[in-house]
Image: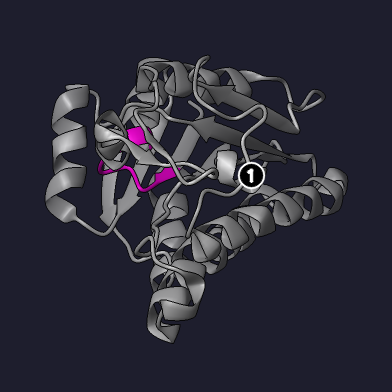
Amino acid sequence: MRVALVTGAGSGIGRASALALHKAGYAVVLAGRRAEELRRTVEMAGDAQGRMLAVPTDVSSEEAVRALFALTKETYGRLDVLFNNAGMGAPAVPMEDLTFTQWSNVVNVNLTGAFLCAQEAIRIMKSQDPRGGRIINNGSISAQTPRPNSAPYTTTKHAISGLTKCIALDGRKYDIACSQIDIGNAATEMTQRMTGGVPQANGSTMVEPRMDVQHVADAVVFIANLPLESNVLFMTIMATKMPLVGRG
């Protein structure tokens, strides 16, 4: 049985991906801050075989991340896939009006959290038998192009691209592959505001098209199921009519 760990698994893309991986036959460890939402994901899976484990976790905490991966190894004996999905944003205000705390919170979850989880995953993957595994980072369209007033989120997502390349390079000798999936306007709670219009780079406000989050989950499963001799280094999956090409 292959084992996957999904962070931010209590809602949105994380939940949809965890459910899709479970359906594809994986044992899935669910990490997130809200225990009740993780339990809801387990309920939605109808996990009669005990192939889901919910572990409330703050990914910005080194101690919590170490405990999460230790429990994963103790329970399932290995780890084949990590989906580094947990993320947060800051208020959409000019960067000069952001507080240091707002900046730090986004950096700690989006970037440091991804690093800490990748670090623990590598430690397991390099030493298990059979060796290796796959790390998938949620980069977001913001890893390519910013929205107005999004400095903390966009900066961390650009940094994820660098982290992805480093993991892909340094993981080769251990049979560890690393991918990044850049997602544009999946229909989740986080993007609900787009149905009422969001600011554009030219100063206008417009309603942006969204896509079914299941398409993202299916893409995550596709990447996860690739043999380790192959890798999708970067994938962009987006609502066809969202304003990306030519944005800004």
- In reply to whether residue 192 is colored magenta, the answer given is no
Residue 57 position in % (x across, y down): 32, 62
Q: Quadrant of the C terminus?
A: top right
Badge count: 1
Q: How is the image coloured?
A: one colour
Extent of the magenta region: 6-13
Question: Tag 1: residue type?
Answer: Thr
Residue 127 position in % (x across, y down): 70, 52
Residue 239 position in % (x across, y down): 48, 19
Q: Nearer the viewer, residue 241 or 100?
A: 241
Q: Is residue 248 left or right of residue 200?
A: right
Residue 72 position in % (x across, y down): 42, 51
The answer to which quarter of the image holds residue 243 is top right
Label 1: element kind: loop
From where the camera sits, is residue 227 visible?
A: yes
Q: What is the residue that sits farthest to the front in this orientation?
A: 203
The residue at which mark 1 appears reads as 145
From where the camera sits, is residue 138 visible?
A: no
- Kindly identify the residue that appears in the image at 55 percent across and 58 percent down: 114
Q: Nearer the viewer, residue 241 or 57?
A: 241
Q: Relative to 241, is 66 above or below?
A: below
Q: Nearer the viewer, residue 228 or 144?
A: 144
Q: Relative to 52, is 127 above or below?
A: below
The answer to which quarter of the image holds residue 101 is bottom left
The answer to which quarter of the image holds residue 231 is top right
